């Protein structure tokens, strides 16, 4: 039942933030990437979240050059999702700005961590 409710929530969010054309594009991206790549990206996001959390708790300056590799990794994960489509990227940013990051990420990111990631990305 939880999976069904989650699927309904995701569908509603997608309809709110993405146009029909964007949703079709994302479905094609999903098919192109395949389930293994998607599961791999989910694991990578978990690793990114853990790394960011450690840096946040250590008080690492978001502009620190040691975070450059993490920035590259985040950009790569985002690129894999939106495929370079600027309108998809804008819709994604809008959704993450307006929605609860814990729900969107299934608990990987909270508002504090999302804010830190934004500062890290803006700094590099």
Image (spheres, rainbow, N blue to C red):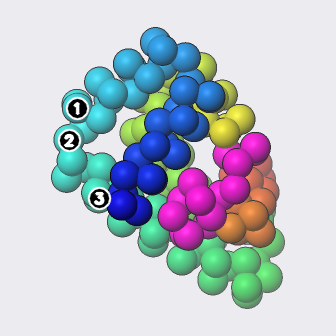
Residue 73 visible within the image: yes
Q: Which residues are magenta?
A: 96-109
Q: Quadrant of residue 27?
A: top left
Residue closer to the observer: 19 or 88: 19
Which callout, 3 or 1, points at the residue further toward the start of the chain? 1
Q: Helix or strand or loop: what does disc 1 sit on?
A: helix
Q: Tell which circle, 2 or 3, labels the residue nearer the N-terminal end.
A: 2
Of the 4 image quadrants, the one containing the N terminus is bottom left
- State the separation of the CA atoms marked 2 and 3: 10 Å
* Residue at the spot 62% in from the left edge and 64% down from the top edge: 102
Mark 1, residue position = 31
Whether residue 120 is visible here, answered yes or no, is no
Task: Pick the residue in front: 92 or 20.
Answer: 20
Under circle 2, the secondary element is loop
Q: Which residue lies under the disc numbered 2? A: 34
State the separation of the CA atoms marked 2 and 1. 5 Å
- Which mark identifies residue 40? 3
Q: Are marks 2 and 1 in contact (CB under 8 Å)?
A: yes
How many circles with numbers are drawn on the protein? 3
Measured in 3D between alpha carbons, the distance from the residue under mark 3 to the one under mark 1, in whole angstroms, is: 14 Å
Residue 62: x and y in percent read: 76, 65
Circle 1 packing at 10 Å, graded few (<14), some (14-19), many (20+), is: few
**Residues at discs 3 and 1 in contact (Cβ within 8 Å):** no
Residue 93 appears left or right of 83: right
């Amino acid at each position: 039942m939880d999976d069904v409710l989650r699927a309904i929530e995701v569908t509603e969010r997608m309809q709110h933030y993405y146009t029909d054309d964007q949703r079709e594009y994302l479905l094609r991206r999903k098919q192109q990437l395949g389930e293994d790549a998607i599961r791999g990206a989910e694991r990578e996001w978990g690793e990114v979240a853990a790394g960011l959390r450690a840096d946040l708790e250590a008080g690492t300056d978001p502009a620190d050059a040691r975070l450059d590799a993490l920035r590259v990794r985040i950009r790569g994960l985002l690129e894999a999702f939106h495929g370079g489509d600027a309108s998809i990227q804008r819709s994604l940013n809008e959704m993450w700005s307006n929605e609860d990051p814990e729900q969107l990420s299934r608990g990987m990111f909270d508002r504090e961590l999302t804010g830190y990631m934004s500062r890290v990305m803006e700094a590099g």
